[in-house]
Amino acid sequence: MKTSAAICRGIGQEWSVEEIVLDPPKTGEVLLRLAASGLCHSDDHLVTGDAPMPLPMIGGHEGAGVVEEVGPGVTGLEPGDHVVCAFVPACGRCGPCSTGHQNLCDMGAGIAFGRQVDGTSRHHAQGEDLNLMCLLGTFAHHTVVNEASCVKVDPSYSLRTACLVGCGAVTGWGSAVYAAKVAPGDTVVVVGIGGIGSSALQGARLAGAELIVAIDPVEFKRQKAKEFGAHATFASMAEALEPVRDLTRGLMANKVIMAMGVGRGDVFSQAMDLTAKLGRVVVTNIHPYAESQITISMSMLTGWEKQIVGSLFGSANPRVDIPRLLDLDRRGQFDLDALVTRTYPLEGVNEGYRDMREGHNIRGILVLNEALAAG
């Protein structure tokens, strides 16, 4: 079949919205009609080159839609099912999955190559095969993905906002609840208030944090942070240091969650300065792949028993936590709709990323099918 998709063809180039040819699903695969896709900062790393991946590549990894066709051997899905695409597949059989670490599923290794499990492609344009961001390629009206990348959800949920739990919302919430292990009474600092940081603020609030501090250079995002649970906001970690010391009577933050658009090793020591004895720094944001050094005081790491923890997908289990976050949203305990600042058609993908870079959005969304997205 023919459909349309937004393709990254080269570092520094804008997204190219093109007609593509899509093959039918093969064994273990499904064809999706997509309703909406979040404009996550991770896709912009393709354009900037911070995350070098094989191009050309269809962008998008925060998607939600409806199953239109299933390939041979698919047992858990059927046409008409509503699904959220998890940016890391969860096969349910590998070591990480079977020990409760679906975010580290062995199938996730294929993310770096962007092809189907069998190493081939279902997506083609201009006579060449196309790769897929996170094995998904949700910047498109249709895509073919492995069933392991799909989490079935109740059709009563809005697919317009459900797409966000495929990455950013669960990643931020899980960074606070699972990776940071925020506990009642904790002081929590969240650095970077985009889709992930805003979700981390909500996770910290739900987990019972007593004092929540948000840090972002953009005034609009600092104002939004207060809606998500922040008690105090600052433009930089350096600016926050002395106020956090005063607010905590010198104890500093129990948990610091790094959710910047692009991590920077040269300012990492500031995160450590904000962290209390026995405190934990959670690194959720992506650093440039070429960056291999950070600046910290190793004596402080040892002498005060501080911890640095990496977190992928918020250390969550997508098959459990995607429906869980949708339920929290329905009960009014988590606000997905408030994360959405602006919506765009597929052809507006470059405008959406300009708005993101200029600090106008918490999260922009591509609405790919108005009727499906509206529910």
Image (cartoon, rainbow, N blue to C red):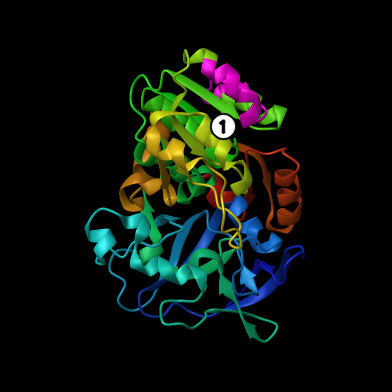
User: How many numbered discs sit on the rendered protein?
Assistant: 1
Residue designated by label 1: 338
| Within-10-Å neighbours for mark 1: few <14, some 14–19, many 20+ | some
Q: Is residue 348 magenta?
A: no
Residue at (49, 83) in percent of width and height: 120
Task: Judge whether 111 appears above or below 303 on screen.
Answer: below
Residue 264 visible in this rendered orientation of the protein: no
- Position in image of residue 149 (x %, y %): 40, 63
Residue at (71, 51) in percent of width and height: 353
Amino acid beneath label 1? Ala
Left/right of residue 226 with respect to residue 329 in the rendered view: right
Q: Quadrant of residue 29?
A: bottom left
Left/right of residue 333 with respect to residue 342 in the rendered view: left
Element on which disc 1 rests: helix
- Position in image of residue 273 (x %, y %): 53, 31
Task: Judge whether 187 appears above or below 85 on screen.
Answer: above
Left/right of residue 356 with respect to residue 100 in the rendered view: right
- Position in image of residue 327 (x %, y %): 36, 36
Residue 2 visible in this rendered orientation of the protein: yes
Task: Judge whether 114 appears above or below 263 on screen.
Answer: below
- Position in image of residue 133 (x %, y %): 55, 65
What is the magenta range? 226-245
Residue at (61, 24) in percent of width and height: 240
